[in-house]
């Protein structure tokens, strides 16, 4: 799972650390790019952590790194289509 079960991030009320702030925004930006392009399974976790980009804590940074570890551990996972049907891939969509 991209986030630990039951993890509830809490806003950081202390003074912002400029180094941590820069690194946190860089990692969140990278994760947002991956989320949009290829890894939709991390969407909830990344959006939840991106809410704390203005003043992240060390805990927020550690959770962002946890998502990176999750991605590294699941990089070989793929979606496999059986291909047993003669019609190929069938998809449906709603116009809404």
Image: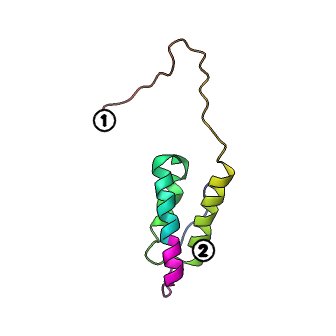
Is residue 4 visible in this depiction of the protein? Answer: no
Q: Is residue 57 left or right of residue 53?
A: right
Residue marked by disc 2: 59
Residue at image point 41% right, 26% down: 92
Mark identifier at residue 96: 1
- The residue stretch that appears in magenta: 11-24
Using the image as rendered, state which of residue 58 and residue 80 is in the foreground.
Answer: 80
Residue at image point 51% right, 18% down: 88
Is residue 29 visible in this depiction of the protein? Answer: yes
From this viewpoint, which residue is outermost toward the left?
96
Confirm or deny contact between disc 2 and disc 1 (CB under 8 A).
no
Q: Is residue 72 magenta?
A: no
Across and down, in percent, residue 6 comes to: 62, 61
Residue at image point 30% right, 35% down: 96
- Give the colour scheme of this rendering: rainbow
Kindly state the secondary structure of the residue where label 2 is placed. helix
Across and down, in percent, residue 44 comes to: 50, 55
């Amino acid at each position: 799972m991209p986030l630990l079960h039951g993890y509830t991030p809490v806003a950081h009320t202390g003074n912002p650390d400029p180094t941590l702030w820069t690194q946190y925004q860089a990692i969140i930006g990278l994760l947002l790019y991956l989320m949009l392009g290829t890894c939709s399974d991390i969407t909830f976790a990344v959006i939840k952590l991106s809410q704390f980009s203005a003043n992240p804590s060390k805990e927020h940074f550690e959770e962002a790194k946890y998502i990176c570890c999750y991605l590294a551990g699941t990089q070989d996972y793929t979606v496999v289509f059986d291909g047993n049907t003669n019609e190929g891939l069938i998809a449906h969509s709603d116009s809404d």
